[in-house]
Image (cartoon, rainbow, N blue to C red):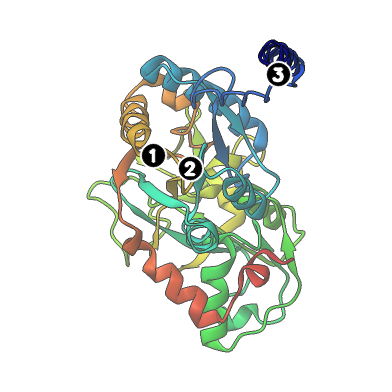
Amino acid sequence: MKKNLWLVVLVLLSVMALTLAGCATPEPTATPVPELGSKERPIKVLFVPSVDVGVIVSGGEVMRQALTEATGLEFEVSVPTSYAATIEAMCASPEDTIGFIPALGYVIANQKCSVEVGAAAVRYDWAVYWAQFLVARDSDYQTLEDLAGKKWAVPDLGSTSGYLFPLVMFQEAGVEVGEVVEAGGHLQAALALYNGEVDFATTYFSPPLTDPKWQPGDSPEPFDPAEVALNEESRAFAGDVRVLDARASVLETAPDIYEETRVLMLTDPIPNDTMSFGSDFPDELKGSIMDALAEFMDTDACQESICSSDFYNWTGLEPIQDAAYDVIRRLIKGLGYTEEDIFGR
């Protein structure tokens, strides 16, 4: 009898265990992360707002389509509000962002969150560029010292060529300028001078295309300023010389800007801007994306995108190592600057 009673108890316990197991709340299953480069999780492509944002957005869309066709990956283009915001966005999404950022921005991003450089821009066979000091053509300014106390238009306080390199030159010369105005881009800085809003401006300088080839030390304006005009393809020429500095991109708005302004002097050469990747971006995707971009630059479509003089005016892409940007690190160290100093926070 006792044996039968124990059998009944065991059966009841088994039934209860099965019942409880059936009523238990199942453990939640982790939602799978979409594959990088899929429509659900496109690769983020960030551009700094150094030229007209509308131009970047429309040109970026052209590039996005070309990269998608070449790689089968999906991309999403955006233009953060400033250099600093671009870096913040890359640091916030280290596994899925590509940033087209200038030398200074790259160095800061590398220091802040290990952003990695993939390639540098090439513009008409140059992997470096310069900054130019622009003044009114009829002004008496001849030296940096003449700009003491004068009102200065810069593209952005985070701009390597538009602010920091010129700032170092002023400091080394012991010159204190007057008010500094952030114009919102290189083209806007040039227009601020043209419109008489400031006494001088600093913008990027790309050498004119001359025969023989322009060399450092040559005149930055080896042409007649009165002859500079846009051709049918909206490219700036003065006779046979193609003109490529920042002013060339505002000729439609200010057709006589070369007659009204001149280059006072140039800075030392600066490493070109970069195509950089978030610190956790998959290595297996980097090469194919850079190869696709290099091929895109040989197409007519690129002239409506990053190759356009109204955009970043890239004509090629060159693999580059982090060490090439040590000159920028020395500049920051020499200034004793922190990220907050550079971006004016």
Residue type at mark 2 is Glu
Residue sitting at x 73%, y 16% = 9
Under mark 1, the amino acid is Gly
Is any part of residue 98 visible from this angle? yes
Q: Position of residue 4 (x, y in %)?
A: 69, 10
Give me the disc on residue 239.
1
Real-space Cα distance between discs 2 and 3?
A: 93 Å
As helix, strand or loop, the secondary structure at mark 3 comes to helix
Tag nearer the camera, 2 or 3? 3
State the residue lying farthest toward the front.
Answer: 1
Q: Mark 3: which amino acid?
A: Ala
Circle on res. 207: none
Q: Is residue 327 left or right of residue 305?
A: left
Q: Residues within 10 Å of mark 1 (few under 14, many from 20)?
A: few
Q: Disc 2 designates what residue?
A: 227
Residue 52 is situated, as x and y percent measured from the top left of the image, at 64, 38
Quadrant for residue 70, please give it: top left
Q: Nearer the viewer, residue 292 or 154?
A: 292
Using a 10 Å C-alpha cutoff, classify the residue at mark 3 as few (fewer than 14 neighbours), some (14 to 19) or many (20 or more): few
Up/down of 200 relative to 78, above or below: below
Under circle 1, the secondary element is loop
Say which residue label 3 marks.
Answer: 17
The answer to whether marks 1 and 2 mark residues whose Cβ atoms lie closer than 8 Å is yes
Mark 1 or mark 3, which is nearer to you?
3
Number of numbered discs visible in the structure rendering = 3
**Going by the image, does 311 lie left or right of 214?**
right
Mark found first going from the N terminus, 1 or 2: 2
Residue drawn at x 58%, y 84% as measured from the top left: 145
Judge the density around disc 2: few (<14), some (14-19), many (≥20) Cα neighbours within 10 Å.
some
Looking at the rendering, which quadrant does residue 267 occupy? Answer: bottom left
In front here: 241 or 133? 133
